[in-house]
Amino acid sequence: MGTAYLDHAATTPMLPEAVEAMTAQLGQVGNASSLHAAGRRTRRVVEESRETIAYAVGARPSEVVFTAGGTEADNLAIKGLFWARKRRRILISAVEHHAALDPARWLADRDGATVELLEVDEQGRVHPETLRAAIARDPEDVALVSVMWANNEVGTVQPVQVLAAIAHDHGIPFHTDAVQALGQLPVSFAESGVDAMTISGHKVGGPMGVGALLLARGVDPEPVLHGGGQERDVRSGTLDAPAIAGFAAAVETAVTHRHATAERLSVLRDDLIDRVRQAVPDVILNGDPVGRLPGNAHFSFPGCEGDALLMLLDAKGVECSTGSACSAGVAQPSHVLLAMGQEGARARGSLRFSLGHTSTQADVDRLAEVIGNVVERARRAGLT
């Protein structure tokens, strides 16, 4: 019995192109900040990777600031823009990943920020009028707006371009976490109109521990890290050239094949949804049924605990998630589902199945084969 890996939103296997690009650099020596031949060679690898990523995501090379991943990029955007703007209000959606929510809350606890959560509808979407009303309460005191491109739990896609335009009407910088969107949706930094955008390597088939914050020209957050002044003087630290090379190869490959991959995953996802519904008739699909990530299917199973379902499925060779991987093991309902108006018991009985570039029909077949019995067993356990 093979394992059905249905947790690509947590991390997806490295693409062969990324493995090749990264391993080609692992045996090389050189610091990209050094001026000798080895340093210049490493700098060339970094700058060519920067150009590759910029082209793939519709940005200028100078707008790509390398980080150690999505969490650092979110922290740099939110803390850095707050400090640079010297205004108190942070407007952030109630369904953001903790990598964005927690820096904002830290600023509220430690640095006088006023964090205002933008409400979402029952599908997890921020409506433009919600943002307009929030800004209107005191537009001169808004430091930044942050709304993710696509939700990591329920897969709902946000109207980022419209929201960014509303923020710009008032001269307010707009940040979006596009970690889940890149490689699944058409993502263009320039066309979106956002000022700062977070992307991550291991979500698109690259290595862990590398990501980037795209920063529009003239947008200069205060640094979170201080040191050598690398990366436009906003992100110091020796650059990881092998990881950056792997990251660039993954982004290029994922974006090049995005349309075909999205079409294939949408077919698999729809089949997965249909077959879970057949096996568990009272299951509830969360998020927008249409405007969602092609690889995302998120369900609530009435009468079940998500952690119990996850472990029972794991024993049957199906690997999935109860939501954000960073919250796994914490016995509390998803903040995303609660913000969407769900009550606690339903929110706790939820699972995310996410597909990626290695997903096959066999993965969906395996889930369909076991999900009915697993849910029945979980419900019996809940009654004892």
Image (cartoon, rainbow, N blue to C red):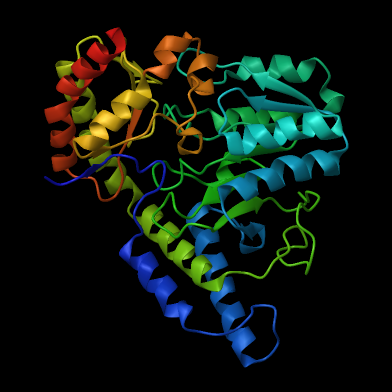
Of residues 17 and 61, which is closer to you in this image?
A: 17
- What x and y, as percent, mark residue 114? 80, 24
Question: Which quarter of the rendered picture does the N terminus lie within?
Answer: top left
Query: Residue at 52% of width from left, 46% of height from top?
Result: 188
Q: Vertical placement of 93 versus 19: above or below?
A: above
Question: Residue 174: percent from the left, percent from the top?
Answer: 68, 36
Q: Is residue 241 above or below residue 64?
A: below
The extreme front residue here reads 384
Q: Nearer the viewer, residue 338 or 358?
A: 338
Residue at image location 45% in from the left, 60% down from the top: 207
Looking at the image, can residue 171 be seen? Answer: no
- Residue 250, given in percent of the width and then of the height, sits at 41, 60
User: Viewed as shown, does residue 29 lie left or right of 254?
Assistant: right
Residue in front for this viewpoint, 253 or 313: 313
Can you say whether 54 is above or below 77 in the image? below
Q: Quadrant of residue 59?
A: bottom right
In the rendered view, does 242 fall on the left or right side of 322?
A: right
Is residue 20 visible in the rendered structure shown here?
yes
Figure label count: 0
Q: Residue at x 66, y 31 (%)?
A: 165
